[in-house]
Amino acid sequence: MMKKCFGCLAESQKTTDDHVPHPYIGAIAECWEVFGGILVKEYSDPDYFKVHRITCDAYGAQHIGNKEDRRARQSANVHLIALYLSISQIASKEEVLSFIRNATKIKREWPPVLQRKQPQWLTVQDIIKADNPSSHADLVTKWGQSICEAYEDCHKQMIELYQQVSEV
Ligand SMILES: [Zn+2]
């Protein structure tokens, strides 16, 4: 039996019901587990790890969670902005990391990110299929690009928020 993730909207194989999902990442436990499988590959092989930044930001940007929860809003915004910075090459890896540090240093009020209705994006179900590091890197990059395209209407706001955080 399949179960649809309310974040990325991908179908995952339904497992037992007693899995506890992440406290504020907007994903069902089954999707979170597939993501865990991707992280295991990245942590156990430096060649897989090369795109780790994009993997984390892509997943966070696709699972925006409850917009009433400040932590969820922070996670959605920060991952989405970081992903956009990486994919559009506006900022270097170091600048992206420094943005993430600055953005999460104090408790800011972040605007809600709106759930995409019918996104044409890749999901963990596509990424987990990679069987070698170069296909993994290629898929993760396409995953990130497809998410940036789905949030095209937010790019201007992302840059403004990035600049606000960087000015402090
Ligand atoms: Zn999901």
Image (cartoon, rainbow, N blue to C red):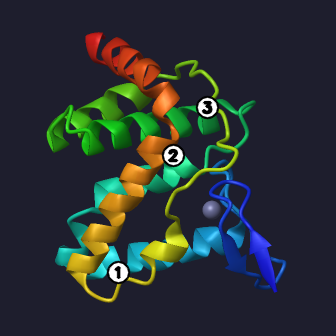
**Residue at 48% from the left image edge and 79% from the top image edge:** 37
User: Label 3, label 2: how many angstroms apart (C-alpha)?
Assistant: 9 Å
Rate crowding at label 3 as few (under 14), some (14 to 19) or many (20 or more) other CA atoms within 10 Å.
Answer: many
State the image quarter where residue 16 is shown. bottom right
**Does dot 3 land on a helix, a strand or a loop?**
loop
Between the C-alphas of marks 3 and 1, the distance is 29 Å
> Mark 1 belongs to which amino acid?
Lys
Label 1 sits on residue: 41
* Image side of residue 101 versus residue 147, left or right: left
Amino acid type of the residue tagged 3 in the rendering: Val
Question: Please, what secondary structure does the residue beneath circle 2 have?
Answer: helix
The amino acid pointed to by label 2 is Ala
Q: Quadrant of the N terminus?
A: bottom right
Residue sitting at x 42%, y 27%: 155
Describe residue 90's horizontal placement relative to residue 148 as left or right.
Answer: left
The residue where tag 2 is placed is: 61
